[in-house]
């Protein structure tokens, strides 16, 4: 049987992303309405964002600043002056019949995002995605198709979101798998959140992604590309990865049956439940957006110096921070990924603890196990952790110096979290008294004297027998450090 | 001088109905075509190297004196990021053709 | 005692209101009586709020009696063109599309008039969405010219012009995209000024073509225009293109020494019957004004023949975009039979089409189609982009002229107002705007003041154009002209 698959020599996957990021402003792009999420329908609207006749846009200076910050973070060139174009189409949630966007001179031109595509506990593997451009635009409203008390056969339009500032970040087609795209998106999100540009809350739609996917198929006879498919509205990291991978397989199968004579450009949606993409619009023959320069907004000059002042400190770019943890703190790829991956606050907290206690490994373990567990349980971020970094560092120093054992230190930390007390105060509140070395020596001597048989066993080389003896010493001295007890016992047996 | 217009495409883009009866379409088409031919006379003006003029602004409203160069605040044409209460839902929907007092209602759009 | 409300300027009359010599309420009642008398035939007003007008006027009178401070326009009855938003008051743009639309907000210009204690009488008729120059494309019937009721008053601010000419209002607010204040002012024998683009806030003006639109006053004299203009000008938090410029007091607008002005004019505008016999008074007035000033300079333009094409391409393109919001969803009428078959998205499309097909009149639909074409993928470069480039050349040429002259004088119209119902070829009527559109393309201030009469006894206006922000030159020269002549005092019988 002549199997088409056999003839396909090589497939190159070509993926580019268009990411819509909601900027973290208090008000909309062109009016003073709040951008808060989740309020009753049409309660955050005004004549401007409702597109009422005669209402005029006025640009939010903070949105423009965040756009400049985005440009700086992406390493792009500023397109100044900032000018606007109307993108025109009809849809009930598009109040003016056009979206104010940027076509001719996007605010961010070029740029790149280096990111790590290594698996969690594998070595670092860097890749760079090139940014084509990023532009500012206003969001549309929302259409509600079911639910609520909608009358039969009706959709409801809520304009609370209409006019919310977005940056649309468009990459070059630099990805070759769903996974790469997902890793890029995670890095981009972290970068924007770290730089204070966006809340990056994907549940609230702060980050929405479209993926352009096609294949270059190098066959024995000819090489061709499948038509580009745009998958719209991918609202989670998982959806980005799965939808792209699904689409790659689908196009491959399709190309095997149709060869190079495939259909034109398509827009598809992603069905999460079915795990499939589906056709939304065939051949965009009617999509003529009739872009027109916006006449109601004067060009806004951006001072050349502004791009410099907006450039994020190197420290505040996640990938640079991971690099720093590996280089300056001796962290492995896994730990640096986890610490930085949690949040900017986690990474900064870690550095502060590690610097103060001088033991990065210990700081990393405690933060990853104890601190992050507590935060996850409480569902809060580092900024709400009750123990300041220098106090955690003090606690860890006591452990390192042998003044506290791990178990007791956990009790102390719990007390510090509960009361907000400094480490020393929590220690004394719990009645923990530092156990002096002479005290340990005295008790060890006594225990050995009481258990000569066990002592002899140990001396004969059975070190496992040390355990029960340590336990007895700790019964007498609960705050003594077990490591010290062990050392003391072995030393005395050796003598 | 102008390529023939496609009335159907234009009506589709502008969400306008095609004229009825069908005989009226040719008439409208001709009339539009004549107007466009008249407009097309502007091609006679040499404009290479000329930037389009979008707004007859004499000066672009630049940052006002006294503002730092690191911020765009105070630029006359820009707005501070301060929330201003707009309209209540009842006011927003007061002129709507169909509303439940909360939403603007339209024939159901499936997505 | 009934004062001579129709025969005196508003500056005069409002002075008498402030000093208590006459009552604002009487002035308003006088206008309302005129409206009651003639609006049925003239259709100048689409909505009149007589109770509110009288109440507001009485409140002004009461404050004056108490010795409270009142604004510079205390008691002045003004009419507002119906494409300017008035909170709670119908703002239809003379279109079925907005036949029941009551805005949630006042336009800035309305807010400022009210703050100056002017009395808003109501809303004036116009060409639908300001698209026209005869005020006969209104969905609510054509406006008639008070000088000859068989004729158009011009447009699109024809209702505002007719209201002032017929004494139904002391002044009116109009909007001018390609001559819509100046041309009806000329044909109705009143004065009207289109200020510099950015002088008066457009917030609340239902946009026709944003980069050309400008709001301005229409009244009986240049002095009246100066008073109103000074009250409505200046930067506005709602309009990012509106600018603060210093000379905003009436005295500042009127105290230019006109003897020092250099006058320019374009002989070509009078050659080959370009302006018609009807503009002989204009030609005469140019000489008379020139004789009063420092000198006259003959100017030549390279772009006269393409001005209208450039203007209409830009205007229609922006209009096609601005009118996208009229879709049957948020504030317009909706025309749709629910029984429409087909799937869901077809139903929405059918609703759009039926609403826009029924709500917009013929000329509006036509301009939307042409604008849509001019912006469409294959046509953008040849139409919108080329027009915007020629626009720059036009503006640069005009700004160049203002190195040698201070004011350019020209005709406003190519002839007298046509009779209503007279079949006018569309292209010819588009070309008829050739004297007025340049000022809009370049964003320049331009004014029309009466300068004579045709043989048939119809008013003729002369246009004065100045460099950006130099309304002071126009108003001072206009006032000087109105001291030399009495054309502006003539009234229709
Ligand atoms: Mg976009
Ligand atoms: Zn708003």
Image: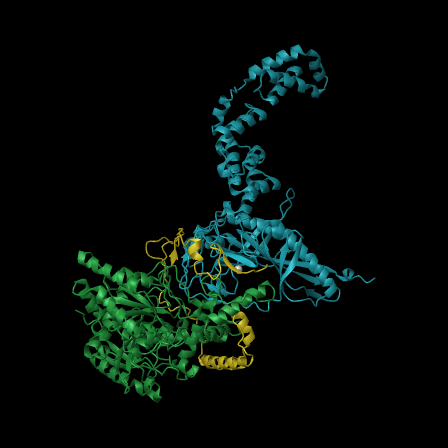
Chain colours: A cyan, B yellow, C green
In the foreground, C123 or A290: C123
**At which x and y percent is residue A436?**
54, 17
Q: How many marks?
A: 0
Q: Residue furthest bottom?
A: C272
Left or right: where A9 falls relative to A474: right
**At which x and y percent is residue C389?**
43, 73
Q: Residue furthest right?
A: A1
Residue C51's place in the image compared with C358, above or below, is above
Residue C170 appearing in the image: no
**At which x and y percent is residue A378?**
54, 36
In the foreground, A144 or C208: A144
Residue at 70% across, 67% down = A260
Residue A249's place in the image compared with C39, above or below, is above
* Residue C77: quarter of image: bottom left
Residue B9 appearing in the image: yes
* Residue C14: quarter of image: bottom left
Left or right: where C340 falls relative to C475: right
In the foreground, B95 or A377: B95
- Which image quarter is the N terminus of chain A in? bottom right
- Which image quarter is the C terminus of chain A in? top right
In the foreground, C89 or A111: C89
**At which x and y percent is residue B95?**
43, 61
Residue C145's place in the image compared with A303, above or below, is below
């Amino acid at each position: 049987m002549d199997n088409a698959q056999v003839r396909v020599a090589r497939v190159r996957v070509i993926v580019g992303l268009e990411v819509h990021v909601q900027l973290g402003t208090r008000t909309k792009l062109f009016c003073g309405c709040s951008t808060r999420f989740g309020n009753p329908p049409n309660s955050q609207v005004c004549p401007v964002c409702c597109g009422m006749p005669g209402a005029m846009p006025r640009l939010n200076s903070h949105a423009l600043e965040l756009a400049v910050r985005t440009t700086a973070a992406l390493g792009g060139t500023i397109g100044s002056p900032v000018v606007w174009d109307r993108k025109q189409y009809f849809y009930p949630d598009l109040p003016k019949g056009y979206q104010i966007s940027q076509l001719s001179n996007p605010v961010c031109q070029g740029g790149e995002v280096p990111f790590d595509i290594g698996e969690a506990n594998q070595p670092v593997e860097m890749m760079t995605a090139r940014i084509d451009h990023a532009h500012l635009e206003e969001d549309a409203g929302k259409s509600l198709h079911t639910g609520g008390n909608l009358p039969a056969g009706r959709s409801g339009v809520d304009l609370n979101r209409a006019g919310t500032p977005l940056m649309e970040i468009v990459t070059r087609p630099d990805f070759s798998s769903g996974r790469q795209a997902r890793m890029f998106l995670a890095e981009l999100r972290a970068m924007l959140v770290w730089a204070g540009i966006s809340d990056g809350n994907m549940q609230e739609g702060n980050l929405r992604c479209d993926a352009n996917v096609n294949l270059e198929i190098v066959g024995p006879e000819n090489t061709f590309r499948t038509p580009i498919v745009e998958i719209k509205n991918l609202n989670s990291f998982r959806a980005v990865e799965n939808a792209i991978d699904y689409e790659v397989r689908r196009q491959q199968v399709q190309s095997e049956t149709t060869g190079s004579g495939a259909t034109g450009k398509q827009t598809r949606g992603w069905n999460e439940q079915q795990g499939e993409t589906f056709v939304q619009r065939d051949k965009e023959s009617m999509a003529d957006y009739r872009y027109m320069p916006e006449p109601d907004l004067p060009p806004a000059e951006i001072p050349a110096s502004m791009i410099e002042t907006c450039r994020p400190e190197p420290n505040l770019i996640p990938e640079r921070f991971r690099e720093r943890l590996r280089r300056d703190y001796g962290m492995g790829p896994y730990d640096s990924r986890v610490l930085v991956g949690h949040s900017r606050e986690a990474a900064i907290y870690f550095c502060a603890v590690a610097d103060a206690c001088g033991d990065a490994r210990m700081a990393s373990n405690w933060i990853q196990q104890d601190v992050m567990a507590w935060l996850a349980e409480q569902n809060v971020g580092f900024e709400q952790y009750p123990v300041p970094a220098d106090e955690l560092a003090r606690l860890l120093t006591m452990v390192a110096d042998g003044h506290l054992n791990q178990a007791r230190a956990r009790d102390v930390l719990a007390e510090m979290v509960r009361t907000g007390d400094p480490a020393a105060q929590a220690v004394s509140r719990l009645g923990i008294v530092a156990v002096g070395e002479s005290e340990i020596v005295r008790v060890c001597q006594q225990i050995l004297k009481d258990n000569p048989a066990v002592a002899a066993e140990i001396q004969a080389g059975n070190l496992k027998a040390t355990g029960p003896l340590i336990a007895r010493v700790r019964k007498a001295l609960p705050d003594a450090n077990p490591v010290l007890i062990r050392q003391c016992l072995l030393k005395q047996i050796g003598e | 001088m102008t390529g023939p217009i496609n009335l159907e495409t234009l009506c589709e883009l502008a969400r306008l109905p095609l004229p009825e009866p069908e005989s009226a379409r040719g008439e409208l088409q001709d009339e539009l075509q004549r107007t466009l031919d008249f407009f097309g006379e502007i091609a006679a003006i040499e404009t290479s190297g000329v930037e389009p003029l979008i707004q007859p602004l004499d000066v672009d409203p630049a940052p006002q004196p006294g503002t730092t160069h690191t911020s765009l605040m105070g630029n006359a044409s820009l707005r501070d990021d301060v929330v201003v209460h707009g309209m209540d839902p009842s006011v927003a929907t007061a002129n709507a053709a169909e509303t439940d007092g909360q939403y603007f209602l339209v024939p159901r759009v499936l997505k | 005692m009934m004062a001579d409300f129709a025969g005196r300027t508003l500056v005069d009359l409002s002075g008498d209101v402030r000093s208590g010599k006459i009552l604002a309420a009487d002035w308003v009642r006088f206008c309302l009586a005129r409206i009651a008398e003639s609006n049925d035939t003239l259709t100048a007003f689409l909505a009149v709020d007589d109770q509110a007008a009288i109440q507001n006027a009485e409140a002004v009178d009461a404050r004056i009696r108490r010795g409270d401070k009142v604004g510079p326009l205390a008691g002045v009855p003004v009419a507002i063109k119906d494409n300017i938003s008035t909170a709670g008051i119908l703002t239809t743009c003379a279109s079925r599309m907005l036949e029941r639309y009551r805005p949630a907000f006042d336009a800035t210009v309305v807010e400022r008039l009210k703050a100056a204690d002017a009395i808003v009488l109501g809303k004036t008729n116009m060409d639908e969405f300001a698209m026209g120059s005869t005020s006969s494309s209104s969905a609510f019937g054509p406006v008639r010219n008070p000088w000859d009721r068989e004729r158009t008053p011009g447009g699109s601010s024809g209702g505002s012009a007719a209201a002032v000419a017929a004494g139904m209002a002391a002044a009116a607010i109009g909007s001018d995209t390609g001559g819509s204040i100046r041309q009806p002012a000329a044909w109705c024998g009143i004065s009207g000024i289109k200020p510099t683009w950015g002088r008066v806030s457009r917030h609340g003006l239902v946009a026709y073509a944003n980069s050309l639109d400008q709001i301005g006053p229409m009244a009986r004299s240049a002095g009246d225009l100066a008073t109103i203009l000074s009250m409505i000008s200046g930067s506005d938090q709602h309009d990012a293109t509106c600018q603060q410029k210093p000379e905003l007091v009436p005295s500042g607008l009127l105290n230019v020494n006109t003897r020092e002005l250099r006058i320019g004019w374009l002989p070509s505008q009078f050659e080959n019957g370009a302006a018609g016999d009807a503009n002989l008074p204009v030609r005469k007035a140019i000489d008379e004004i020139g004789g009063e000033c420092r000198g006259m300079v003959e100017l030549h333009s390279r772009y006269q023949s393409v001005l209208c094409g450039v203007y209409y391409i830009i205007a229609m393109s922006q209009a096609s975009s601005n009118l996208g919001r009229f879709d049957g969803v948020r504030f317009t009428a909706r025309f749709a039979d629910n029984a429409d078959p087909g799937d869901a998205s077809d139903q929405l499309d059918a609703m759009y089409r039926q609403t826009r097909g029924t709500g917009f009149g013929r000329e509006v639909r036509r301009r939307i189609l042409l604008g849509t074409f001019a912006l469409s993928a294959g046509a953008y470069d040849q139409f919108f982009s080329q027009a915007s480039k020629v626009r720059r050349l036009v503006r640069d040429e005009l700004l160049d002229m203002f190195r040698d002259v201070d004011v350019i004088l020209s005709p406003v119209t190519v002839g007298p107002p046509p009779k209503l119902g007279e079949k006018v070829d569309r292209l010819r009527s588009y070309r008829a705007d050739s004297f007025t559109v340049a000022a809009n393309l370049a964003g320049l201030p331009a004014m029309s003041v009466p300068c004579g009469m045709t043989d048939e006894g119809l008013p003729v206006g002369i246009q004065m154009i100045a460099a950006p922000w130099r309304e002071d030159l126009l108003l001072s020269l206009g006032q000087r002209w109105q001291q030399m002549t009495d054309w502006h005092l003539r009234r229709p019988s």
